[in-house]
Every structure is written in structure tokens, then in C-alpha cells.
Amino acid sequence: MNPTHKPSPFRAVSRPGMALLASLVVACAAPVLHAQAVALVDSATNYSTSNALASSLTFTDFSLGAGNALVVVISSEAVGTNAFSVTFGGSAVTANVANAQGAQSSAVYWIINPSVTTGDVVVDLGADSRAGVSVLSLSNVGGVSDSDTFTASNNTTSFPISYDATAGGFVVAGYVDNGSNTGGSASISGGNINTTLLSLTNDQDGSSAGIVQGYGSISATALATETFTSSRNTSSNNRHAAALVAFSAIPEPSTFAALAGLAGLGLAVARRRRS
């Protein structure tokens, strides 16, 4: 043996031993590699109809409470052209996903960690509209894992949106069609959305649009699909618009500590093996 070179103590560990050590480290870290799930703190809904058209809808003094994110879901049939804008406490909410098919428009707006936590939520619809709006306060929101929209002008009565869902996250969506006064209701099914925020039949107070908005918690990381079904199963129901956003949770501080510890162990092993 070269007397000037001290053998690394890690060289004395067999490969099975190193594998066992790595397994133990991962097993010990596993309980802290998680995030606290996104949760609904509060919600409110409002709508306008053909008998009482509106160009804007306001939620007075909406409070986030313990939440850190404001989400606004809009589904509208305009008498003209929708051009949405949203403010919270007088400040613009700019992050959004939106789409339109003719007079039918759907959008989701959001802001994470806003500078105000209580204030009026004002939704400008851009034109007189039959519209439904839901406002939500969510807690533990770290970001957006995915978002998407669809529009269609055909006789199909159900439409899927697929998205990347993250365990512990939360998904919201809205949909509108031109159901034409049959008394039918639109629906969202098949994925993580299991709670309806707002459902307006297509004959609600003289209206002709079917509107549905909903949310759900995400239990598993996977490619998920929500299916939107129109309020009328006939060929005249030929305009559809939907928007969806999936939120991810804030990682726990222990997650970062565990990852840093694992990275440090790996670096130490690598350095000792080079010595």
C-alpha cells in the first residue's frame, strides 16, 4: 500500500453496503418529501341573465382569509363581444387563460400572493352579457402546473381537456354553450373536478346559455382529463368554450432541507471517492 495515500473510508464499504446506505437515506427522507395540499378557503358566485344583462359583476370586500391566491372563473354569452378584465382591490389581475367561440367565452384569471388580501373583485365583461362568475380563495398555492382551453362550433355534445395534474394540487374550470332554452344543464365529469361552483340552466331567467363551473382537489400526479358535456343534445347546440387551470402546492420547507441533505451526501461521497 502506498504509505502517502490514506484510503477513503467509503472505499471500504461494499457496493451492497452503499446501496443499503442510499436506501436508508431515501427512506428517512421520504416522510418529509411532500407538500401541504392546496385547499379552498372561501368562494362566491354571481351571475347575470337575459332578463338582467350585465357588462360587469362585482364581489364587494372579498377576503382571501388564510388563502394566498385569488382565482376568478368567467363563463359568458355576450350580446356583442366579450373582452374580460379583472381587478382585486383596484389592482389588475393579469394572469389568465381564455378563449371564445362566437358569443361564447370562458376564462380563468388568477393572482398568487397579491399585495392586498381584502377588496372588491370587479369583473368587466366588455359587453352586456349572460354570464356566470365564481371567485375563490385558495391556500398553499405555489404555482400553476398546467392550463388549457377549448372552443368548438359543431354538433358534438362532450369535449375533453387533458392536463398535467400534480398531487396536492387543485383544479378549476368553467364552460359555456348556447343551449337555447331547453332547460338543460351542462356538466363537468370524469376527472378531479367533483364540486360544482355554479350551474345555470340554458333557460335561466330567459337566458339561452348553459353554464357550469367547478373545482376539485388533485390526489395523484398524472395526466388527468375533465369532460365537459353541453346542456343540449341537438345540432343547434354548436358553440362551446371552456377554460381550465391546475394549481400546484407550495413545497414544505422540510422538502428543501431533505433534498439539500441528499445532495450534500452525494457530493461528500463523490469527493471522498476522488481522494
Image (cartoon, rainbow, N blue to C red):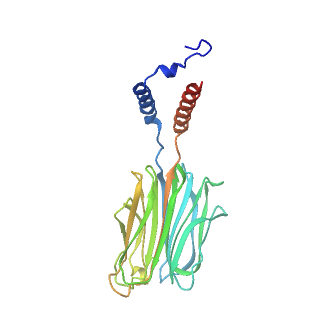
Q: Position of residue 230 (x, y in %)?
A: 37, 77
Quarter placement of the C terminus: top right
Closer to us: 12 or 218: 12
Closer to us: 207 or 216: 216
User: Which residue is outermost to the bottom?
Assistant: 236
> Dividing the picture into quarters, in which one does residue 15 lie?
top left
Tell me: 185 left or right of 9. Answer: left
> Dividing the picture into quarters, in which one does residue 164 lie?
bottom left
Q: Position of residue 181 (x, y in %)?
A: 38, 85
Quarter placement of the N terminus: top right
Seen at 50% across and 60% down, the residue is: 146
Q: Position of residue 93 (x, y in %)?
A: 62, 63
Seen at 47% across and 44% down, the residue is: 36
Seen at 57% across and 83% down, the residue is: 81
Seen at 41% across and 58% down, the residue is: 223
Q: Position of residue 24 (x, y in %)?
A: 42, 28
How many numbered badges does the structure rendering display?
A: 0
User: Which residue is outermost to the top?
Assistant: 3
The vertical placement of 20 against 216, above or below, is above
